[in-house]
Structure formats: structure tokens, C-alpha cells
Amino acid sequence: KGLLLLLLGGMEKNLANGTHIRGDINMLLVGDPSVAKSQLLRYVLNVAPLAVSTTGRGSSGVGLTAAVTSDSETGEKKLEAGAMVLADRGIVCIDEFDKMSDQD
């Protein structure tokens, strides 16, 4: 049920006092090894209209939002969007979140 609610989303609300309530929910899948958490994430990636996948092992906390890189030819520095920015108004699937370092 939770994954279905995540995929469908809710309705955004703008209250009279100016408060904005987003309609999206956050979800954390926790379970023993070999319980098909990664398979559920892959299913969501295939079904959702906008979804970005990353792993805790391959990204840092800062890298999820943005990263500064330099061009090898010109040496020019540029800002590259991370997974959370690329999936704005979509779904970010982070597999093996526990593998991310404690510093992140």
C-alpha cells in the first residue's frame, strides 16, 4: 500500500495563512537481507514517470544534492545536479543507504 501511495502522491495545499503543504510522502524500506527491497525499488523505477536511482555506496550526502566538478580540458569548475535535484517532483531510490559513510 505504501509504494502505491508513493507513486500516486497526494494533493498539494496552500493554506490561507500562506503555508504550503506538499502532497508527496517519503518512504524508508527497512528489512532483513533477501526480502526483495531492491526488487521493489527497481519496480518503482520502471513504473514511475520520473525516478532516479543511486546507491549509498556510490554517492555521498552532498553528492545527492549537487557536486562541483572541473572540466579536464579547460579546468573550468561547474556545478552538477545530484540525484535529488534531478528527480525534483519525482522519486529518488537510494539502495544500500546503510553503506553511506557516517560523515555524510
Image: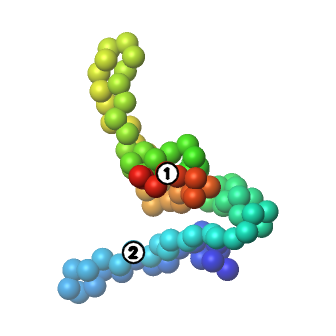
> Where is residue 62 drawn, in percent x and y?
39, 48
Mark 1 or mark 2, whichever is nearer to me: 1
Residue drawn at (50%, 45%), measured in percent from left and top? 59
Q: Is residue 47 visible?
A: no
Q: Is residue 46 visible?
A: yes
Identify the residue position indicated by label 1 in the image.
101
Instruction: Work out which residue is located at the far right of the displayed protein and give it.
Output: 34
**Where on the picture, by quarter, is residue 5?**
bottom right
Amino acid bearing label 1: Ser
Spatial CA distance of label 1 from label 2 is 30 Å
Is label 2 in a helix, a strand or a loop? loop
Number of numbered labels in the structure image: 2
Identify the residue position indicated by label 2 in the image.
22
Is label 1 in a helix, a strand or a loop? loop
**Where on the picture, by quarter, is residue 15?**
bottom left
Sequence-first tag of 1 and 2: 2
Residue drawn at (54%, 60%), measured in percent from left and top? 91
Q: Which mark is residue 25?
A: none
Residue drawn at (20%, 85%), measured in percent from left and top? 17
Asked whether 33 or 73 is in front, the reply is 33
